[in-house]
Amino acid sequence: MHSFLQLVREQLQRGLSLAVFVVSVGLVALIVCGIIYVWYRKKMKAPVAIHWGKLCLSLLFLGYLTVLIYGTLIRYTVGEISGVNWQWFRSWKEAWNEASPQKWLNIILNIALFMPLGCFLPILWKKLRTWYGALGVGLGTSVIIELIQYFSGRGILDVDDLFTNTLGCVAGFGIGMFLIRVFSKGKKYRKQAALYLCFPGILILAFVGLYAGYTLQEYGNLSETPSFRVQTKNVVWELEYTLDDTLRTAPVYQAQKLQKESCVEFASYFAEKPGLEFPDAYYYDNCTIFANHQTGDFLEVSYFDGTYTYTHSLAGEDLQDVQLEPVEVRKILTAYGIPIPEEAQFQYEGNGVHTFAVDLYDTGDAIMDGTVRCWCRGSGVVKKVENNLLSLTNYREEPILTQAEAYEQLRKGNFTNGDYFTSLSPQKITVESCFLDYKTDSKGFYQPVYQFQGYTGSGESIQMFVPARK
């Protein structure tokens, strides 16, 4: 999250620098035109009337438009980000499902970017002192920007942006009308001013309500919850697996959730045994990435459950992938402070990838679940370690969907991995297996999820997830 805020600050500084330049040019042009105007009026012996306040506001509006154009168009290079999203409220659902401060901040920034537009409109133009006027200008401006982004390849044509931008413009309109009523002090101006504050007030209360709702709910949100309904109307579904229709419950487990401080402590602990150093750290809303660019060592640690991935990007570049015996791999992982339970199942996946897997094994003190993957090259050089092995505690039994009920959700398009499904454009899906898996939610709980595996009519394999808890 910190790194994202730093990026936002850098982009804002660049936008403001460009705005200062444009306003300065506009000011010079205004002064020149003003001198000519005054000279002409005096020559014609006409009174000189200059609305300095409105001129200053117009210059500020010019600066704002510069920031708006920079933030939505100029800061992107052609082809850097492109595509189309026709799913309404997808970005809101993704931010909620992932409990991602970064994605919520991105939504808030999209709203805030258009608030000055709504604020300036009624102040500079009396004909736009209506809410529907602000709505029309906000929507129209957003449509123009989205179309330019799409056809120029400088962004994504996103219907969610149309909504958030228009929302911001209407909220800004409320602030602008509030200022007009306060400074005009006409009849019943206090009541009218308070009424206009309802526009941004309702918006603020909505975000407060979302935050309160998330804070008060017992479990966290699952990123495996679908953020949009996949179009499956014309898809033919076929089962090669007998679905279980028995009502049942499943345990919910609790994993170890990390904070920023505990994440830093873990990185120090991890680096100590193999003698690594991580001078740089990049903080995001769901993980921290520790880095040593000189040696090529990188460690990415998840806040949700403490899982992590270590990569040595410069390791054994001149060596070939190698297959090692389980005992040798255990010794290598022990050197990195990763103990492997004796009950873990070993598998060599090829290409130097060695895997230890544990399936909800009760050690007496905790329940172990997950996998550890180790990429090795000649002479036992470690290229990468991916530790998804969790130490869990029992939390509670919860009622879950039956396999048949989950399959119905699948047929209705309520599953994750929808973008990949859509890209395949399948006419037929054959489901060959369904089993209960577990995924960590945003509060560190290990929740049951149905995993369906299958293939399309043309042979492409596909995985689809449906949250199991009712």
Image (tube, rainbow, N blue to C red):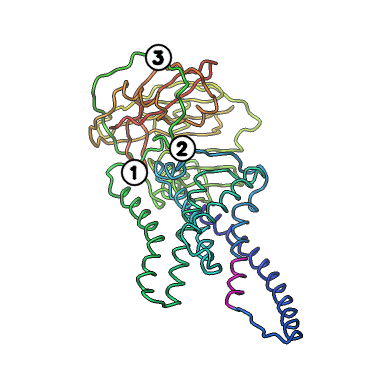
Is 195 on the left or on the right of 138, as rendered? left
Mark 1 or 2: in front is: 1
Characterize the magenta stretch by its predominant secondary structure.
helix
Decide: is 320 above or below 34.
Answer: above
Residue segment shown in magenta: 53-62
Name the residue tied to disc 3. 239
Q: Is residue 394 left or right of residue 182?
A: left
Q: Position of residue 444 (x, y in %)?
A: 34, 41
Residue at (70%, 69%) from the top-left corner?
A: 25
| Marks 1/3: CA–CA distance | 35 Å
Name the amino acid, label 1: Lys
Query: Which x, y percent locates residue 173?
Result: 47, 62
**Contact, mark 3 vs mark 2 (Cβ under 8 Å):** no
Observer able to see residue 329? yes
Q: Which residue is mark 1?
A: 443
- Does the CB distance between marks 1 and 3 fall below 8 Å? no
- Element marked by disc 1: loop
* Mark 1 or mark 2: whose residue is earlier in sequence: 2
The residue under label 3 is which amino acid type?
Leu
Residue 296, horizontal then vertical, whole percent: 59, 42
Instruction: Give amino acid for label 2.
Output: Tyr
Q: Secondary structure at mark 3?
A: strand
In the rendered structure, the answer to whether residue 95 lies left or right of residue 23 reads left
| Mark 2, residue position | 336
Q: Secondary structure at mark 2?
A: loop
Depth-wise, is mark 3 or mark 2 nearer the camera? 3
Looking at the image, is mark 3 or mark 2 earlier in the sequence?
Answer: 3
